[in-house]
Amino acid sequence: MPPDKYRVLLVDDYVPVRITLRSMLTGYPDLQIVGEACDGKQAIEQVAACQPDIILMDYHMPVMNGIEAARLIKKSWETTVIIGLCTVPDTFVTDGFLNAGALAVVHKERIEHLHSAIQRVFPQRASSDCLIAQH
């Protein structure tokens, strides 16, 4: 049985993006933001501390990029769902995230479809009235 709320970790080096994500996702009753990180190394530390169900992770970050972090996170926390975030459609980044264990990649210009992407990776929680983004 799925939890009442999925625990979400936000990972992006750009504070305004994290603020936007937090603001956008806070209104959904099925999500709870449990932490934030500004780079891949900090993301790994936050996963250990916060035990999120979902990680929303940018690719371009200092110290360690999102693909490297995703690969390391999936080695220790196999059931944690990772959704990659990137600024432009880029097959290198998309393929890199998917090969590292992410279940989806959302381009930031389509960030309004992020909740739909989350519902697609957890279909048992998707409601019949949700809008699923068309790609």
Image: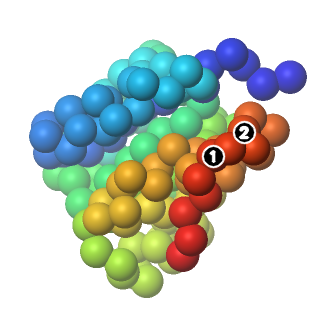
Q: Which residue is more in the foreground, 97 or 117?
A: 117
Q: As drawn, is 110 to the left or to the right of 105?
A: left
Q: Amino acid at mark 1?
A: Cys
Let me know if residue 111 appears in the view: yes
Residue at position x 34%, y 35% from top? 24
Q: For mark 1, what is the residue?
A: 130
Looking at this view, is 112 or 104 the one in front?
112
- Residue 73 place in picture, x, y as percent: 53, 42
Extreme-right residue of the structure: 1
Question: At 59% across and 53% down in the image, what residue appears?
Answer: 131
Q: CA distance from mark 1 to mark 2?
A: 6 Å
Q: Position of residue 21 (x, y in %)?
A: 31, 38
Give the position of the C terminus as an image quadrant: bottom right
Q: Are marks 1 and 2 in contact (CB under 8 Å)?
A: yes
**Image quadrant containing the N terminus:** top right
Residue on which disc 2 sits: 127
Q: Can you name the residue that lies furthest to the front here?
A: 129
Relative side of 77 to 67, left or right: right
Residue at the spot x=14%, y=37% of the render?
15
Secondary structure type for disc 2: loop
Q: Nearer the viewer, residue 27 or 67?
A: 27
Which residue is drawn at the image coordinates 61% and 58% (left, top)?
132
Taking 112 as reference, is 48 left or right? right
Q: Residue furthest bottom?
A: 91
Q: Quadrant of residue 99?
A: bottom right
Residue type pointed to by label 2: Ser
Vertical relation: 90 (above or below) 132: below
Q: Give coordinates of residue 79: x percent, y percent.
A: 70, 38
Crowding at mark 1 (Cα within 10 Å: few <14, some 14-19, many 20+): few
Image location of residue 68, percent across then percent down:
41, 57
